[in-house]
Image (cartoon, rainbow, N blue to C red):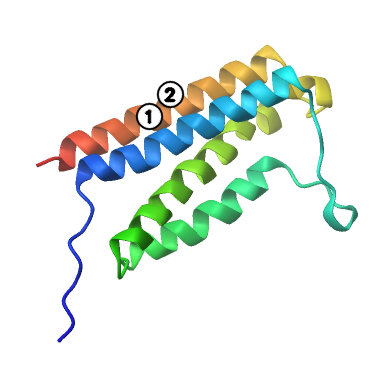
Amino acid sequence: MKETPEPLTPQQTLWLILVPMLATFLSLRLYLHGVGVRHVYPGGHLVHHLYLGVLILIPAAFLLAFSTRTRVAAAVANVAVGIGSALALDEISYLVLTQASDRDYISQVSLYGAISLIALAVILLLALYLAHRD
């Protein structure tokens, strides 16, 4: 009978999600506010980073829901959750609260909305960590 690998600790899970989420968010916002808005049009269709985030986040969540066979797979899935979450959360306030123009990407509403959503995600992540730590 094959032995199940030891799962990641709550602290490892926290860092594997938190660091990529914050690094992705900071990098994205620095790029948007420093370089400017650049769009991606594969096949002639505008792809927002919300969509890319969801495409990264959902498979990672499914993988984690059914447990992973190795610690490396668990680590990669957790990193993907952090990256995908940051991409998706960053764009929600932009799409919901603004007219979704290029100027709105770097507006205060978009920025503060994104910061608020990321802060809520960090609080939830920390609360889950505190509830599951050893």
Question: How many numbered circles are shown?
Answer: 2
> Which quadrant, please, contains the N terminus?
bottom left
Residue furthest to the bottom:
1
Q: Which residue is mark 2?
A: 119
Q: Is residue 45 left or right of residue 31?
A: right
Residue matched to label 1: 122
Circle on res. 69: none
Q: Secondary structure at mark 2?
A: helix
The residue located at (38%, 29%) in the rendering is: 122
Going 71% across and 24% down the picture, which residue do you hit?
32
Q: CA distance from mark 1 to mark 2?
A: 5 Å
Residue at the left extreme of this rendering: 134
Dots 1, 2 in contact, CB < 8 A:
yes
Q: What percent of the width, then of the height, locates residue 64?
A: 36, 60
Tag 1's secondary structure? helix
In what quadrant of the picture does the C terminus appear?
top left
Q: Amino acid at mark 1?
A: Val
Q: Nearer the viewer, residue 16 or 98?
A: 16
59 up-or-down from 129: above or below? below
Residue at image x 19%, y 72%? 4
Furthest toward the top, the residue is 108
Question: Quarter-wise, where is residue 36 in the image?
Answer: top right
Query: Which residue is more in the foreground, 4 or 115?
Result: 4
Using the image, determine if residue 64 lies above or below residue 25.
Answer: below
Amino acid at dot 2 = Ala
Disc 1 crowd, CA 10 A, few/some/many (<14, 14-19, 20+): some
Relative side of 2 to 73, left or right: left
Examine the image and state in which quarter residue 92 appears.
top right
